[in-house]
């Protein structure tokens, strides 16, 4: 265990002030639809160049963890994920807000985020070198099977009709094929449009598929956006802590899932939260409540996506391989600072890395009071805003968020068209979540399959490459369990019901 002097350095007044400011800035940026955690870190990186490396890392880590949590605000209050990591937060967070429990939902999100962040930081502190080696074992084939495993979660995301959810997933896969192919460089489905060569932008699609239908509902419906509820105690901290204690195993399992997924380069919080949500629903006694405002669903997603922060830093610091997109920005900032990442970092520059890890703990703890305070005013303010002012404000943020990613007006057009498409599909009973899942995982699955096939063919057997690797076999087993579990539970559940009434 590293010495106490690093902790004291992280507890210095300057480090605490930097951590507090970073968390607050990250929360505010993450709460705005489309302004992702990657953008939050990238925008504020220049302000860290004049700091010493350890304090600069604390600032960037605080911004990162704050932005991941901040995405929960718009996800819960507007059904609009502030960041891609908050996609699954909308499933149960928004229904809770609609029935008047928005303050409780924000409190639960804050508590789960803090716990997940602490678990991820603990893994980073204690198990960084051995866990980083796991990431090196993942090749293209493993990423292909991991993407397939993610696509099997469509069954868990089905709201009503499983067939419609599968069709939505296929639509997402088709959208992921637009543009230049991941391997080979073939141009597909662009209609000779230069704007589509880069494919469908994930952030623009995310904003369009989730935000525009909500905006249209705001304008079309005379009812209030959400109810204040019969009681509002601003924090409902006691009630939230009791719910967290009741769901402690779910939070711990989801935090571990988030940490492990964060270690895998390129996976990120969106995949982690979807896997954690699926697992929470799979083991729940009443899985049918998920999607209607079930606290366990919210706790699973928020604890897992914040745990990816610590998990993502493991391959970044130990191997120089960014675990998530924000880690890539932070890695670039470290190189500018002259910090050499790699196994030697924990020996030659231990003061920097351990000061940062302790600072990440401190920033995560600071997220509790800051998050509760911001959440208190966010919920009350949003409920009190007239719809005539709320709708154009959200519309402005959606346009700003989709344009600001690449300063590209074509991506605003993509956002609007996909939003209109999602609104029409919703009227026919299709959910946006399977479409988003197919869009995110489609490119990962395609790249992994093509590269794995080429490698296997060069070795003499593509089948052996896909089905002969130990990690691949383990993932395939989880895929089969995920596919068979709903069928088995429905079959045995019906038998139990018949037995009760016999």
Image (cartoon, rainbow, N blue to C red):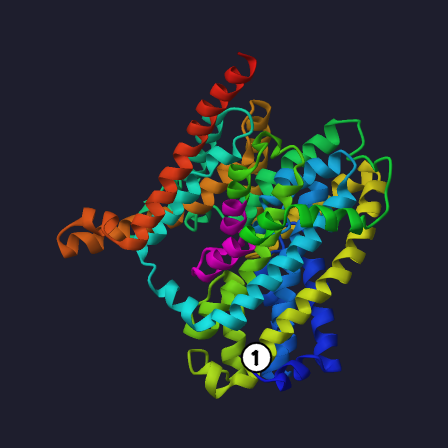
Asked whether residue 410 appears in the rendered view, the answer is no
Q: Residues within 10 Å of mark 1 (few under 14, many from 20)?
A: many
Q: Residue at x 41, y 70 (%)?
A: 130
* Quarter containing the N terminus: bottom right
Q: How many marks?
A: 1
Q: Residue at x 47, y 32 (%)?
A: 168
Percent coordinates x, y for residue 446 in the rendering: 34, 47
- From where the camera sits, is residue 99 visible? yes
Residue 131 shown left or right of residue 296 in the figure: left
Relative vertical location of residue 345 with respect to residue 382 in this rendering, above or below: below
Residue 224, position in %: x, y?
Answer: 81, 32
The percent coordinates of residue 159 (x first, y second) are: 56, 29
Image point 51% across, 43% down: which residue? Answer: 279
Q: Is residue 441 magenta?
A: no
Q: Depth check: 72 or 420 in front?
A: 72
For mark 1, give the secondary structure: helix
Q: Residue at x 77, y 56 (%)?
A: 372
Q: Which residue is mark 1?
A: 354
Magenta span dominant secondary structure: helix
As rendered, which of 243 and 136 lies closer to the eye? Answer: 243
Instruction: Specify start and end residues of the magenta stretch as a single range.
Output: 255-276
Q: Locate residue 62 relative to residue 462 in the image: left or right.
A: right
């Amino acid at each position: 265990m590293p010495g106490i002097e690093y902790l004291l350095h992280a507890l210095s007044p300057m480090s605490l002030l930097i951590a507090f400011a970073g968390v607050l800035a990250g929360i505010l940026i993450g709460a705005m639809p489309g302004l992702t955690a990657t953008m939050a870190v990238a925008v504020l990186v220049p302000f860290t160049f004049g700091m010493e490396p350890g304090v600069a890392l604390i600032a960037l880590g605080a911004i990162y963890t704050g932005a991941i949590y901040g995405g929960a605000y718009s996800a819960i209050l507007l059904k609009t994920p502030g960041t891609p990591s908050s996609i699954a937060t909308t499933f149960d967070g928004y229904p809770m807000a609609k029935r008047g429990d928005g303050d409780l939902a924000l409190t639960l999100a804050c508590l789960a985020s803090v716990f997940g962040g602490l678990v991820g930081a603990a893994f980073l502190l204690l198990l960084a070198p051995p866990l980083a080696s796991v990431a090196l074992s993942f090749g293209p084939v493993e990423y292909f099977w991991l993407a397939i495993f993610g696509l099997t979660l469509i069954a868990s995301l089905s709201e009503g009709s499983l067939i419609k959810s599968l069709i939505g997933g296929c639509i997402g896969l088709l959208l992921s094929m637009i543009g230049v192919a991941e391997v080979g460089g073939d141009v597909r489905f662009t209609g000779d449009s230069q704007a589509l060569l880069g494919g469908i932008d994930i952030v623009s699609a995310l904003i369009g598929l989730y935000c525009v239908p909500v905006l249209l509902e705001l304008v079309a419906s005379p009812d209030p956006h959400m109810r204040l509820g019969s009681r509002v105690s601003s924090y409902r901290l006691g009630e939230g802590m009791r719910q967290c204690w009741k769901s402690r195993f779910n939070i711990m399992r989801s935090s571990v899932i988030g940490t492990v997924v964060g270690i895998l380069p390129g996976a990120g919080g969106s995949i982690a939260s979807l896997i954690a949500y699926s697992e929470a629903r799979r083991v729940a006694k009443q899985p049918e409540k998920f999607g209607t405002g079930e606290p366990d669903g919210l706790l699973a997603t928020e604890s897992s996506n914040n745990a990816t922060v610590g998990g993502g830093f493991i391959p970044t610091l130990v191997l120089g391989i960014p675990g998530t997109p924000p880690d890539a920005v932070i890695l670039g900032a470290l190189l500018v600072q002259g910090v050499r990442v790699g196994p030697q970092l924990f020996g030659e520059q231990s003061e920097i890395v351990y000061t940062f890890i302790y600072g990440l703990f401190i920033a995560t703890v600071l997220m509790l009071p800051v998050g509760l305070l911001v959440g208190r005013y966010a919920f009350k303010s949003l409920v009190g805003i007239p719809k005539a002012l709320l709708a154009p404000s959200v519309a402005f943020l959606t346009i700003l968020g989709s344009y600001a990613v690449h300063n590209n007006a074509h991506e605003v057009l993509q956002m609007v068209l996909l939003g209109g498409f999602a609104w029409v599909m919703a009227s026919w009973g299709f959910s946006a979540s399977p479409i988003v899942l197919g869009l995110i995982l489609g490119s990962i699955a395609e790249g992994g399959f093509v590269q794995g096939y080429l490698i296997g063919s060069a070795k003499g057997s593509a089948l052996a490459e896909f089905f002969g690797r130990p990690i691949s076999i383990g993932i395939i087993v989880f895929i089969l369990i995920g596919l068979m579990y709903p069928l088995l539970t429905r079959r045995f559940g019906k038998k139990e019901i018949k037995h009760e009434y016999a």
